[in-house]
Image (cartoon, rainbow, N blue to C red):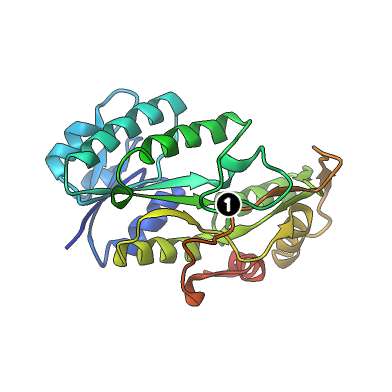
Amino acid sequence: MKKILIIGASGFIGNAFYKELNSYFDTYGTYHTDNDFYDKNQKFYQYDMELEDITILLESLKPTLIISAVRGNFNAQVDMHQRVIQWVQSHRCKLIFISSANVFDTFSNYPSYEYDKTFSESVYGRFKIKIENALMRIPTNKYVIARVPMIFGSGTPRVQELKTLHSLEAPIEVFPNVILNVTSIQKLTQQIHYIINRNKKGVFHLGSTDLIYHQDLIEEICDILQLKKTIYKKVFDSNNDRYLAVLPRDNVLPKNLQTTTKEVIASVMLK
């Protein structure tokens, strides 16, 4: 049985992966802040990437698969990932790195595909590219780069933020010129499960198969959540349409694991 370590398993995405995979694999996770529940759970290890060397935990646990869904200080993350990559190279182990559509946030005229050149002007995008580039220097069978767009679904941070802003009668920012694709947390966990089961490798774009304007997306989600009299603040960061979408071409998943923007919007109401 695969022994999986999820770095960042107490975060929203990492915890969703843990719940999806725990029944099928020998699954472990890390958490950062003191927490009685995780402390008593034999499958969770407290880990602070700014103070501790991840190699110590890896040597102790000896996972055969590592999923990185960690958040936090960018410099500490880069250092941690370099150590993880070194460890993966010398052990029977693979790393699944959860990356972002933001690695393409400078390219604005068209959607991006798996092996397009990455280029970002944002600090977040450049930091993700740095880790991606380090991974691409090692054999392909040692890693999966999963580029993920905005994540929605019941209980997701983005949906909670919309509800909070609405309750405070604060404006919700929408970008009328930005065209993107999205995913749901439910579909993302299924896709990662499939990638693990089929021992896939390389770069995957895990977003909806179709695109939508950011403004239309947010308005439709607010409608389905029945958020009445919502205040929108339109932000124009360009005079022209701008794409921030990651579409698959080389590594296409089976039909049942693909999703549409309509399904993602509907997922905000799923329990």
Q: Quadrant of residue 159?
A: bottom right
Outermost residue to the right? 239
In the rendered image, residue 67, in percent from the top left (x then y), is placed at 33, 49
**What residue is drawn where x is 59% and y is 36%?**
119
In the rendered image, residue 170, in percent from the top left (x then y), is placed at 77, 42
Outermost residue to the bottom? 256
Q: Quadrant of residue 107?
A: top right
Outermost residue to the left? 60
Tell whether 268 sits left or right of 21.
right
As rendered, which of 40 and 23 lies closer to the eye? 23
- Provide the residue designation for mark 1: 149
As rendered, which of 110 and 69 lies closer to the eye? 110
As rendered, which of 142 and 75 lies closer to the eye? 142
In the rendered image, residue 249, in percent from the top left (x then y), is placed at 54, 62
**What residue is drawn where x is 34% and y is 36%?**
32
**What residue is drawn where x is 21% and y is 50%?**
43
**What residue is drawn where x is 17% and y is 32%?**
56
Label count reads: 1
Camera sees residue 48 = no
Camera sees residue 70 = yes
User: From the viewer's perspective, is residue 146 above or below residue 90?
Assistant: below
Q: Residues within 10 Å of mark 1 (few under 14, many from 20)?
A: many
In the rendered image, residue 23, in percent from the top left (x then y), is placed at 26, 67
User: From the viewer's perspective, is residue 36 above or below residue 210?
Assistant: above
User: From the viewer's perspective, is residue 67 above or below residue 257?
Assistant: above
Q: Quadrant of residue 154?
A: bottom right
Tell whether 55 sits left or right of 210.
left
Residue kind at label 1, given as amino acid type: Pro
As rendered, which of 255 and 62 lies closer to the eye? 255
> Which element carries disc 1, helix, strand or loop?
loop
Q: Quadrant of the N terminus?
A: bottom left
